[in-house]
């Protein structure tokens, strides 16, 4: 059943802080920079913002919880900077990943709890911490992995990826087409961490292995920074300076999932299909209606699983689907047009949401896809309790 709220809300502003590996300012300052930029981009004033929401969770296990340094929650914005002096509604969501917070914002706008909602995600990655081996408990399930050095997300993803390659008689060299395409797109994105660093197929194939069959460039690049967006109702959006990106549908991953110590590729697809199905159902759309796909790529294989789970190609066909420029800016289905987490930077899917908005509002500059009327953005791998949205040019 098509969602009753389809087209009733829209994104009207985007703000991005500097994305860096060596920050010169604390995370809170970067978040304020992004939020101010989003409000200004929307043509609004700070006092217009009466709703705020965020996904403030720690970016990695064991991270600190110092507000304004390790994370930036709603209280920080309320207590610092005078950024939104007249807040009437707020939320901070710790489940469902990034899009769960703007989903709350959408419902607040439709219900009348707020008129203009500011949403942000700030990421802090101290030097030497991303996927580093610290101390782990070997109790419970950990006794079957941690004591043997199996403690990282990339190792779990590598197991499923190896299963995928074996099951469908594929080879990892084909992944170069997807990863180098993302880097090419990042080279057209001034906000991307790898804006000035191209990557060749040879660079990819010669990269060191992290957990076979995954190499360094199959992993997203850890950065410090923040992206923010401003949302409002469709009727208010018409009077603002930017074209609105209308929210046509959303979904959160509520698929049943058995509790295994590690998962094979079948589990990824079984969890991903119903998740995307809910987004399509609410929007009254299907894969053939999508012009641009911003698909989560915290690890490159996740994008393969989303291409299949979302119905853009058949099961086991994604590595063939991404060949020959099919997912390039000129291809039949442009994917991760901004560079993705692999090349713009690890923002947990926030960059995917922002780029989907840019594409349907003709604001992607050199990356702009002609006649991009619909764009889907999905965060998290199919096994995470992630979320996603479809944006449209028209309400």
Image: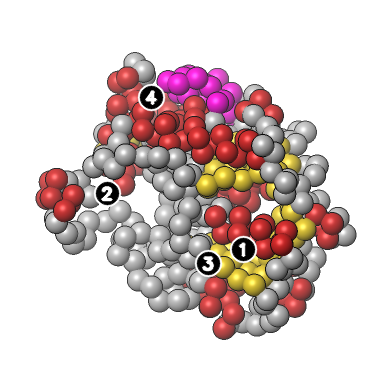
- Up the image or down, 360 lies above or below 237; here it is above
Q: Nearer the viewer, mark 2 or mark 1?
A: 1
Q: Can residue 237 be seen in the rendering of this structure?
A: yes
Distance from disc 4 to disc 1, alpha carbons, whole Å, reads 38 Å
Tell me the crowding category of disc 3: few under 14, some 14 to 19, or many 20 or more residues within 10 angstroms, Cα based: some
In front: label 4 or label 1: 1
Q: Position of residue 361 (x, y in %)?
A: 76, 46
> In this figure, which residue is indicated by the disc labeled 3?
92
Pair 2/3: label in front: 3
Q: Nearer the viewer, residue 361 or 329?
A: 361
Where residue 36 sits: x, y (%)? Answer: 67, 70
Q: Which one is closest to the eye, mark 1 or mark 3?
A: 3
Q: Which one is closest to the eye, mark 4 or mark 2?
A: 2
In magenta segment, residue 318: yes
Labels 3 and 4: the sequence-earlier one:
3
Marks 4 and 2 close (CB-CB < 8 Å)? no
The C terminus - image quarter:
top right
The correct choice, above or below, for 63 with respect to 319 in the image is: below
Give the residue at mark 2. 152
List the residue tagged with mark 4: 173
Camera-nearest residue between 162 and 365: 162
The quarter holding residue 334 reads top right
Q: Measure how far apart labels 4 and 2 are at the Cα level.
A: 23 Å
Task: Pick whichever of labels 2 and 1 is earlier in the sequence.
Answer: 1
Secondary-structure class at tag 2: loop
Please name the residue shown 47% across and 35% down the image.
272
Badge number at residue 119 = 1
The magenta region covers 311-329
**Label 4 or label 2, whichever comes before in sequence order:** 2
């Amino acid at each position: 059943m098509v969602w009753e709220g389809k087209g009733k809300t829209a994104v009207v502003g985007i703000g991005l802080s500097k994305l860096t590996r060596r920050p010169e300012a604390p995370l809170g300052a970067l978040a304020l920079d992004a939020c101010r930029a989003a409000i200004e981009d929307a043509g609004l004033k700070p006092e217009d913002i009466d709703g705020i929401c965020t996904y403030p969770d720690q970016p990695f296990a064991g991270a600190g919880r110092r507000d304004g340094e390790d994370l930036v929650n709603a209280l920080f914005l309320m207590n610092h900077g005078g950024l939104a002096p007249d807040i009437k509604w707020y939320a901070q969501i710790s489940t469902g990943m990034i899009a769960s917070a703007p989903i709350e914002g959408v419902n607040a706008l439709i219900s009348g709890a707020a008129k203009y909602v500011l949403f942000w995600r700030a990421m802090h990655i101290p030097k030497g911490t991303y996927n580093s081996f610290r101390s782990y408990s070997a109790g419970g399930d950990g006794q079957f992995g941690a004591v043997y050095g199996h403690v990282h997300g990339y190792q779990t993803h590598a197991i499923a990826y190896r299963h995928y390659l074996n099951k469908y008689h594929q080879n990892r060299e084909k992944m170069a087409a997807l990863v180098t395409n993302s880097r090419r797109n990042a080279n057209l994105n001034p906000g991307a961490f790898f804006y000035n660093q191209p990557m060749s197929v040879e660079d990819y194939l010669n990269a060191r292995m992290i957990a076979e069959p995954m190499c360094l460039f199959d992993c997203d690049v850890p950065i410090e920074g923040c992206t923010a967006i401003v949302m409002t109702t469709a009727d208010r959006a018409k009077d603002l300076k930017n074209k609105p990106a209308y929210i046509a549908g959303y979904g959160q991953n509520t698929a049943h999932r058995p509790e295994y110590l590690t998962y094979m590729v079948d589990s990824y697809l079984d969890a991903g299909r119903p998740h995307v199905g809910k987004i399509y159902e609410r929007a009254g759309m299907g894969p053939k209606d999508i012009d641009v796909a911003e698909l989560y790529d915290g690890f490159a294989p996740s994008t393969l699983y989303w291409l299949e789970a979302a119905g853009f190609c058949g099961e086991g066909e994604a590595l063939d689907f991404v060949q020959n420029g099919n997912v390039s800016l000129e291809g039949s289905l442009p994917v991760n047009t901004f560079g993705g987490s692999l090349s713009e930077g690890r923002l947990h899917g926030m960059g995917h949401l922002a780029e989907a908005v840019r594409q349907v509002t003709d604001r992607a500059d050199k990356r702009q896809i002609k006649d991009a009327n619909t764009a889907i953005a999905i965060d998290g791998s199919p096994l995470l309790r992630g979320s996603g949205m479809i944006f449209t040019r028209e309400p």
